[in-house]
Image (cartoon, rainbow, N blue to C red):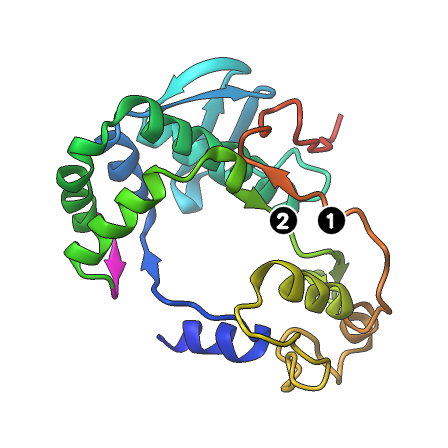
Amino acid sequence: ENFVSMVESNLCVQIDNYICMDTAGFRDIINALGGLDIDVPFDMEYEDPEQNLYIHLKAGPQHLNGEEAEQFVRFRKAYVTGDIGRISAQKIFLTALANQIKENLSIGVIAETVQVLMNYVTTDLSVLDAVYYAKEAYNVPLSSIRYVTMPGMGVRSPSGASFYVIYRANALHIVNKYLNVFTDDISDGIFDSRNVFGNVGVSYIDEVYQTPYQDLDEEVLSAEDVDKDSVYIPIIE
């Protein structure tokens, strides 16, 4: 609830409900849905015993179970842009998930499926509300599901810690264009008024955050068009 409140008040957006899951819940949900088909863009190899994370996926079209899907969405080692590359890969995953639901679940079994999936998440939704939303979402065409990543830049602290800092002016533009539920535009004066996403006392963060508005390609992708060829993720050769 506190996180929802922080995001709402500083990004000036409206969040009606939340759903949280851990990695075990993620695996169980994918398995309950029967897995999903993903064209893995390249061999993904990474091991981190401290996290009990072992990623071994081969390139090419394949049907992933819950454990394998977790490997796909958590992999980032070879991406030039690190976490941002992983976010791009997760767009491919979300589209594959939407396809799995639309192609392999009928509207008639949605209610039963949602009630099972509710066991794996923490949410403020009631079962009845979740079933209602699921049935509504089932009828949304893939062309109406769109992804956009907030423009920004990766920075590194003197101690070596990495951060992704959004461009404040561009973020405000995206909120007004895609996420604003109010009658008037969100003004610069109320957007992130507490400077939560910047840091006035740290110049290498604040200088990026305060970058003047740039006419950037926002790369708004429709789920109808997303696949490994339409989402460019630069990798370390």
Give percent across and percent down for residue 15.
43, 68
Secondary structure, mark 1, is loop
> In the image, 29: left or right of 220?
left
> In the image, 51: left or right of 43?
left
Picture quadrant of residue 189 = bottom right
At a point 63% along the width and 76% down the height, the residue shown is: 184
> In the image, 141: left or right of 119?
right
Q: Are marks 1 and 2 in contact (CB under 8 Å)?
A: yes
Q: Considering only order in the chain, which callout, 2 or 1, is on the residue closer to the N terminus?
A: 2
Which mark is on residue 60?
Answer: none
Magenta span contains residue 121: yes
Q: Which residues are magenta?
A: 120-124
Instruction: Give the answer, above or below, for where 103 lies relative to 130.
Output: above
Amino acid under disc 1: Glu
Give percent across and percent down for residue 158.
77, 67
Amino acid under disc 2: Val
> In the image, 233: left or right of 17?
right
Instruction: Give the labeled residue for mark 2.
Output: 148
Instruction: Give the CA separation, mark 1 to mark 2.
Output: 7 Å
At a point 86% along the width and 69% down the height, the residue shown is: 212
Instruction: Give the answer, above or below, for where 11 lies relative to 70.
Output: below
Magenta span contains residue 89: no
Neighbourhood count class around disc 2 (C-alpha, 10 Å): few under 14, some 14–19, many 20 upward:
some
Quadrant location of the C terminus in the rendered image: top right
46, 123: nearer the viewer: 123
Q: Is residue 121 visible?
A: yes
Give percent across and percent down for residue 101.
32, 30
Picture quadrant of residue 125 = bottom left
Instruction: Give the labeled residue for mark 1.
Output: 218
